[in-house]
Image: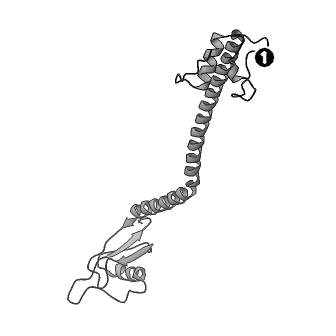
Amino acid sequence: MSTGKPSGKTTHQLLFSEAISQPHTMASSHAPNGSGPNYASVSTRPGITMDHILQEITVVGLRLEVMDFKIMDLARMIEFDHHLTDVEGRLNGMPDRDQELQLLRNKLTDREDRSGRYKVCFFGIPEREEATDVRASLRDFLPGLKGLVFSLTLEFQRAHRIAPPPPPQRHPWETVPHHSVLP
């Protein structure tokens, strides 16, 4: 049924239109004799009808739908893999965060301990040779003050001056002892 004029259709469109117009034969120009493409014609496959071709096209369409679903499943699996990789990356960073968290906990505990101690500031204690042990200097100095009676031994966890020795002609810096428990 081919007229030989170019109609702007592709070879597959021409074959399909010729197959519809002549359900039991194909154009002779498409025969497997070397004069055209080697397509199986309806005439070489006996018993093939348009209904059978339509059924095959329907089956191919269903297979394409199944492939679409598989592609969507594959896309979901790829997205899941990206999320899983992200979570694994976060989990790999957890030991560093655990160490940092433990360090912060230790600092917080130290700050709580330091703020919970009893601190007393003494002003006017003269600067002496206390560079070796400020606690011993305080234990020796305090009982000698007039009007103070100590029935218990004075124990300090720590004691220090607020700053280095003052310049000459200046009052001494305050001394701060730290107690766990006051008597």
Mark 1 residue type: Arg
Whole-percent x, y for residue 49 in the image: 72, 10
Tag 1's secondary structure?
A: loop
* Of the pair 58 and 120, the residue shown nearer to us: 58
Whole-percent x, y for residue 135 in the image: 41, 79
Classify 166 as above or below 179. Answer: below
Q: Residue at x 37, y 77 (%)?
A: 160
Instruction: Give the farthest residue toward the right.
Output: 46
Q: Residue at x 65, y 28 (%)?
A: 67
Q: Is residue 113 visible?
A: yes
Instruction: Give the farthest residue toward the left.
Output: 169
* Of the pair 30 and 76, the residue shown nearer to us: 30
Q: Residues within 10 Å of mark 1 (few under 14, many from 20)?
A: few
78 left or right of 26 in image: left
73 left or right of 47 in image: left
Whole-percent x, y for residue 117 in the image: 41, 64
Residue under pointer 1:
45
For residue 18, which quarter of the picture?
Answer: top right
Q: Is residue 154 visible?
A: no
* Of the pair 114 and 34, the residue shown nearer to us: 34
Image quarter in which the N terminus is found: top right
For residue 51, which quarter of the picture?
Answer: top right
* Of the pair 100 and 54, the residue shown nearer to us: 54
Q: Residue at x 52, y 24 (%)?
A: 8
